[in-house]
Amino acid sequence: MTIIRFDSLESTNRYCEALDLNQVEDFTCYWALQQTAGIGQRGNHWESSSGLNLTFSLVLHPDFLPASEQFRLTQMLSLALSDCLRSLDLPKPIHIKWPNDIYVGNDKICGILVSNRLQGEHITASICGIGLNVNQTDFPSWVPNPVSLLSLTGKQFELEALLQQLLDHIAQRYHSLRLGNNLLPEYLGQLLRIGIPAKYRYRGCTITATIKGVDPFGHLLLVDDANRELVCGMKEISYI
């Protein structure tokens, strides 16, 4: 495990994308104290104040995974982050919001963005970008329902120690994935709103539907109130 630290980068994911990943060792972490243009899901900006949060990218070489099973990486990372947060005894329940946000109660504390490089039918390298709200308490008004460890606990966290703790949890889950263990039941067990009727925005319309699971490709599986089965990609559906 190697940690490479920067005072400031535009984006740790973009920095990694410019590297020759064949020359980067498995489980190398690129950590920036400040990201000036962090990337979130759907092309959104990831908001993070300088020196207050964890923003990093982890380069993995999961060549044991077929390209068709790349969503298992997202499952692994989501569970590892949940493991780490649970070890901190937070006062509210922790959930995974499909596909890969981590919520504490009804608020978002962490986001994940995975970019895979494929060769034939296998993954040769993965850039796993992670942003965790740690010591920030003031967020711009446009950031939806953010929360941080400091606002939840009233305690400041030392970033490097927390990063090491988080990487240890990822290493444990990554080893389990390498052994071929099925992480889907745990992922579904922590999925926000699973089995609960709720409102969603689906292809431009508001619907009521119930999450039933996730397919091997990472699509969200729902049943709407007309008993139609829906198989949704990330750009087709959003939570309300």
Image: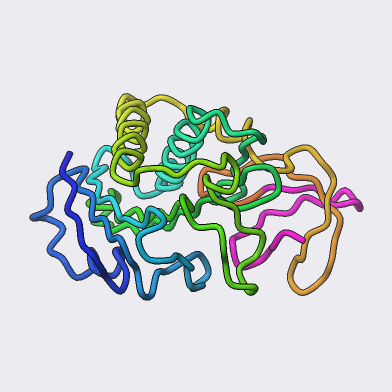
Does 235 appear in magenta? yes
Residue 100 in percent (x, y) is at: 52, 50
Report the residue that reaches farthest toward the right: 226
> What is the quadrant of the N terminus in the image?
top left
Q: Is residue 91 left or right of residue 80?
A: right
Query: How is the rendered protein coloured?
Result: rainbow
The residue under the point 85% across, 61% down is: 207
Front residue of 48 and 193: 48
Residue 214 in percent (x, y) is at: 61, 43
Count of marks, rendered view: 0
Front residue of 46 and 41: 46
Front residue of 225 and 137: 137
Q: Is residue 67 left or right of residue 7?
A: right
Highlighted magenta segment, given as a residue range: 221-240
Does 212 appear in magenta? no
Q: Is residue 63 left or right of residue 238?
A: left
The residue under the point 25% across, 46% down is: 60
Q: Is residue 84 left or right of residue 12?
A: right
Residue 12 in percent (x, y) is at: 29, 64
> What is the quadrant of the C terminus in the image?
bottom right
> Relative to 65, is 115 above or below?
below
Residue 168 in percent (x, y) is at: 31, 32
The residue under the point 74% across, 43% down is: 193
